[in-house]
Amino acid sequence: MQANSRQVSSNQPHLHHKLAAVVRRHLSTPYRRPPAEHSMRAYEAIRDKLQLQPLIVDSFCGTGHSSARLAQQYPDHLVLGIDKSAQRLARHPDSSSGNHLLLQADCEDIWQLLVRDKLLPQRHYLLYPNPWPKAKHLQRRVHGHGSFPLLLQLGGAITLRSNWQLYVEEFGLAMHLAGCRGSISMVGADPALTLFEQKYRDSGHNLWQFCGVAASSTAP
Ligand SMILES: C[S@@+](CC[C@H](N)C(=O)[O-])C[C@H]1O[C@@H](n2cnc3c(N)ncnc32)[C@H](O)[C@@H]1O
C-alpha cells in the first residue's frame, strides 16, 4: 500500500447533531433485516468450530492480517475475521495458525447469527471501518447503523480504531448513550495490526481508538 493516504475530509466538523436521536431510536427498535443467504451459508459452514474455543471477532477485517496477528496473540482463542469483500480476503497472508477463520459475509448478518446462537465473543475488534465522512451518511457508520444494538448484544471488550478522530468520538458517545463507558486514546506505537493502520501511520496520520466493554440492556 502507498504511504500517501489523504486525511479524512468531511463536511461535518463536529459530532453529528442527529447522533443522539439516531442512536436512541436504534436502541429502542429491534434490527429487522434478515441475514442474506450467502452470509447464512458461510456461517453455517463454520458454526460448529465456533463452539470449541473462546471467540474473538475481527469485524471489517479486510485482508485478515489482523485476524492472523490476533490469533498469534491469543493462541487459546478462535479469531473470526469477517469482511464482505472477496477481493480483500483473497489477499490474506499465508499463515500456519490454526486458530483463525475468515468469513466472506456482511458483519451485520453474522452479528445477528452469533447473537441468535449465543456465541458471544470475549473480544471484538472493529479496525478502521469505512468512515463514511459525509454528514448525510451518519447511518452508514457503525454507531449510526440500525445494527448497533447487535454489537452491544454481542458484548465483550470492544476495540474500535480509526484515523478520523470524530468517528471514534461519535462511537464513544453512542456507547455512552447505551450505558457502556470506555476510553478514547491514541493508538500506540506497537507494530501495526492491519494494512490500513500501517498505511495511515506511514502517511503521518494520528490514529485513534475506543476501548470499552459492550453490554446490552436489551436481551438478545
Ligand atoms: C477501510 S477497510 C479496513 C480493513 C481492515 N480492517 C484494515 O484495517 O486493513 C474497511 C473494510 O470493511 C469492509 N466492509 C465494509 N462494510 C462491510 C460490511 N457491512 N460487512 C463486512 N465488511 C464490510 C470492506 O470490504 C473493507 O475491507
Image (tube, rainbow, N blue to C red):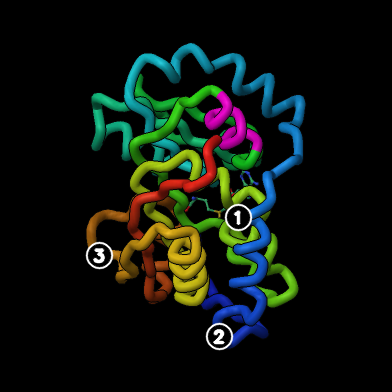
Q: Residue at x 42, y 42 (%)?
A: 155
Residue 5: percent from left, percent from top: 52, 71
- Judged left or right of residue 18, residue 121 is left
**Tag 2: Cα neighbours inside 10 Å, few (<14), some, or many (≥20)?**
few
189, above or below 156, in the image: below
Q: Is 114 covered by the magenta stretch?
A: yes
Q: Which residue is mark 1?
A: 27
Q: How many marks?
A: 3
Q: Which residue is mark 3?
A: 188
Amino acid type, residue under disc 1 in the picture: Leu
Task: Name which of mark 1 and mark 3 comes first in the sequence.
Answer: 1
Mark 1 vs mark 3: in front: 1
Give the residues in magenta.
Answer: 109-116
Task: Name which of mark 2 and mark 3 comes first in the sequence.
Answer: 2
Please tell me in which quadrant of the rendered image residue 192 appears. Answer: bottom left
Residue 97: percent from left, percent from top: 32, 24
Q: Which residue is mark 2?
A: 14
Amino acid type, residue under disc 3 in the picture: Gly
Q: Secondary structure at mark 1?
A: helix
- Judged left or right of residue 29, residue 153 is left
Residue 195: percent from left, percent from top: 44, 52
- Gap in angstroms between the C-alphas marked 2 and 3: 25 Å
Judge by depth and name the residue closer to the eye, 62 or 168.
168
